[in-house]
Image (cartoon, coloured by chain):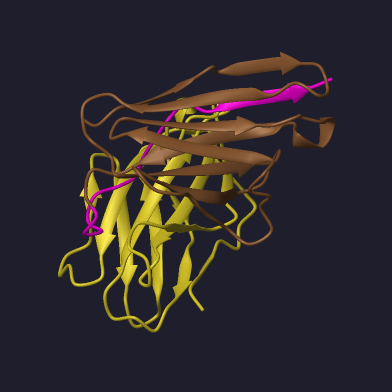
C-alpha cells in the first residue's frame, strides 16, 4: 500500500528557531500533498495544499510567511515553521493521495510533535 | 457548505461487543466520498474504510463496516467484535466535492474499549 513518511517525529527547540518538517511519498508520486495542524483533543485543521512545482494554496487564516511550504519534487514536500514561538507548538501531519479522482484515500505521515520552549 | 458532524465526543464499549460511531454529512453535490480514519494515541492517521456516494452496497473491511444511509446523509462506522487495540480517536471525513483533493473532517469520537 501507499506509504507516506514524515520526519522528524518530534522536535523540541527554543523560541525563534526555524523548524523544517519533511513529508515524502515513498512508493508513489504525489502532485499534491496536504499539511494539517492538530491541537490536543481536536480535529485536523487543513493548513495548506502543497502543489508540486508551484506555490502552495493556504487556507484562510494561515500565515504564509510563518508556514513556508516547498514541493520541489513529486515525492517531497517540506513545511518550515519560521521563527517558531510557543503558540506554534502543535501536532503537524501531512498527507498525500495517489488518485485525484477521489476514490482513493489520503495516506498520512506519522506526524510531527513540535514543542517550542 | 459541506460539513461533517460527529455528535459523540466519547464512546465506551466492552471487549468483543459491537459499537456504532455516528457520522452525518451535508452536501448538495451528488458525487462525494466518505472515509473513516483511526488515530491512536501515538498520532498516526490510519485509513479504515471508504464509501462512494454511488456505491450500491455498504462498504466492509474486516471488522469494519459502514452503515450508509444516503437519504439520511449518514455514514456510521460499525466495529464488530471490539478489541482493546481499537481504543482510539475515530474521524469521519468527506472528500470536498468542490476540490476532490481536500478532506473535510468531523470533530472525532474517542472510543474506549474495556475488558
Rendered view: B87 above or below B11: above
Can residue B80 be seen here? The reply is no
Rendered view: B92 above or below A24: below
Q: Is residue B89 magenta?
A: no
- Residue B49, given in percent of the width and then of the height, sits at 30, 48
- Residue A23, given in percent of the width and then of the height, sits at 43, 28
Q: Quadrant of residue A101?
A: bottom left
Range covered by the magenta-colored residues: A100-117
- Residue A22, given in percent of the width and then of the height, sits at 47, 25
Identified at 47% across, 69% down, the residue is B24
| Nearer-the-camera pick, A117 or B74 | A117
Q: How many marks?
A: 0
Q: Is residue A105 magenta?
A: yes
Q: Main secondary structure of the magenta part?
A: loop
Q: Which chain is brown?
A: A
Left or right placement of residue B94 versus residue A82 in this view: left
Q: Which chain is yellow?
A: B
Residue furthest to the left = B56
Residue furthest to the front = A54
Q: Quadrant of residue A6?
A: top left
Identified at 22% across, 62% down, the residue is B58
| Nearer-the-camera pick, A112 or B69 | A112
| Nearer-the-camera pick, A6 or A80 | A80
Q: Quadrant of the C terminus of chain B?
A: top right
Identified at 28% across, 53% down, the residue is B50
Rendered view: B2 above or below A76: below
Left or right placement of residue B93 versus residue A12 in this view: left
Amino acid at each position: 500500500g501507499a506509504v507516506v513518511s514524515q520526519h522528524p517525529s518530534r522536535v523540541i527547540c527554543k523560541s525563534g528557531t526555524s523548524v523544517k518538517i519533511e513529508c515524502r511519498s515513498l512508493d508513489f508520486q504525489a502532485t499534491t500533498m496536504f499539511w494539517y495542524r492538530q491541537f490536543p483533543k481536536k480535529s485536523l485543521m487543513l493548513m495548506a495544499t502543497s502543489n508540486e512545482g508551484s506555490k502552495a494554496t493556504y487556507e484562510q487564516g494561515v500565515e504564509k510567511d510563518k508556514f513556508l511550504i516547498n514541493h520541489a519534487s513529486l515525492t517531497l514536500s517540506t513545511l518550515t515553521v519560521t521563527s517558531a514561538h510557543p503558540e506554534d507548538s502543535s501536532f503537524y501531519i501531512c498527507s498525500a493521495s495517489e488518485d485525484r479522482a477521489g476514490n482513493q484515500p489520503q495516506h498520512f505521515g506519522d506526524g510531527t510533535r513540535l514543542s517550542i520552549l | 457548505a459541506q460539513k461533517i458532524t460527529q455528535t459523540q465526543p466519547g464512546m465506551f464499549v466492552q471487549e468483543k461487543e459491537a459499537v456504532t460511531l455516528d457520522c452525518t454529512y451535508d452536501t448538495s453535490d451528488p458525487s462525494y466520498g466518505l472515509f473513516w480514519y483511526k488515530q491512536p494515541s501515538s498520532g498516526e492517521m490510519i485509513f479504515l474504510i471508504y464509501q462512494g456516494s454511488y456505491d450500491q452496497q455498504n462498504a466492509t473491511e474486516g471488522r469494519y463496516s459502514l452503515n450508509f444511509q444516503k437519504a439520511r446523509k449518514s455514514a456510521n462506522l460499525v466495529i464488530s467484535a471490539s478489541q482493546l487495540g481499537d481504543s482510539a480517536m475515530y474521524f469521519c471525513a468527506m472528500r470536498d466535492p468542490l476540490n476532490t483533493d481536500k478532506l473535510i473532517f468531523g470533530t472525532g469520537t474517542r472510543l474506549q474499549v474495556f475488558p
